Amino acid sequence: MRVPTEEIDITFYDGKAAFPTSEPVIREKSLEIFLNNRKVATIACAGVHLEELSAGFLQSAGIIRGRGDIENITAHYESSRVDVITTKRVPAKKDSAGMFIMSSGARTESPRKPKISVVSDISIPAKKVLELMEIMLSSSELHRMTHGTHCSALADTEGIIVSRDDIGRHNTIDMLGGYILLNNIDCSDKIIVKTGRVSSEIAEKVWTMGIPIVISHSVPTSEAVSILKEAGITLAGYVRGGTFKVYSKEGRVRF
């Protein structure tokens, strides 16, 4: 898959003088998701892993529940369009505009909140929390190139399984959700490692996926902490400089 960047001309000031140069910037595309031949969402994204992003988005919005709900999913990368056909012709969930409009950092409607707390026997050594964060940050080549993306990774206690970069932190979580859904992955022993703030929307998405542990380079909001406590999900946040803070369900971290 082509790297989602574009080279642009800029003027760089080095503290002493300004001179022309060029650098890669992250590409932005508008993905259109069609559900049973009806457009239900437009999402600003980098234009990669469109099947995963679409499937994860539809799941987090409560429109589909699992891989069995999808009869066919087809991505058209040149036109930034994904067509999803469901097995039971799942009706689209509508807002006043008739569809979801999602930017890189906001959405029109919160996803459906699951009602069952996440139950898992998983535990993780404190040093492994730090290690997983370092591995994820060092492996994000697109971020190193552009400094304009967020990254999230699916992991277990052995290491990183898969990571995804995009212009939106919500998108990276939906991509992982789509990867999990399309590959029928059991999440009871899995971990999300991510950059960016943990907002209530992120917390809801992780709850929908059934992930028991979240490790974040940044901090949560108060509403996110409340949701994660209700969900029974562990959050280790502000992981940097060899330290971190546990905001919920601290018993899963072995100090």
Image (cartoon, rainbow, N blue to C red):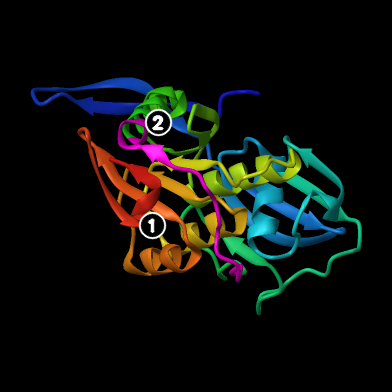
**x then y, percent, for residue 15:** 10, 26
**x then y, percent, for residue 211:** 55, 50
Give the amino acid type for the residue marked by disc 1 in the picture. Lys
Q: Is residue 85 left or right of residue 184?
A: right
Inspect the magenta stretch and tell me whether residue 176 lies in it.
no
Q: Is residue 237 left or right of residue 186?
A: left
Please give the name of the residue rendered at 76% of the width and 46% of the height, measured from the top-left corner.
82
Inspect the magenta stretch and tell me whether residue 128 lies in it.
yes
- Rounded to the nearest angstrom, the CA distance separating label 1 from label 2 is 19 Å
Q: Nearer the viewer, residue 252 or 239?
A: 252
Q: Is residue 35 left or right of residue 17?
A: right
Q: Residue at label 1?
A: 249
Q: Could you say whether the residue bearing mark 1 is in a helix, strand or loop?
A: loop
Please give the name of the residue rendered at 31% of the width and 37% of the height, measured from the top-left corner.
126
Question: Few, some or many C-alpha atoms within 10 Å of disc 1 (few <14, some 14-19, many ≥20)?
Answer: some
Q: Residue at label 2?
A: 132
Mark nearer the N terminus (1 vs 2)? 2
Image quadrant holding the N terminus, namely top right
- Tell me the chief SS of the magenta region: loop
Residue 124: which numbered mark, if any? none
Q: Nearer the viewer, residue 142 or 154?
A: 154
Start and end of the magenta stretch? 113-129
**x then y, percent, for residue 141:** 44, 23
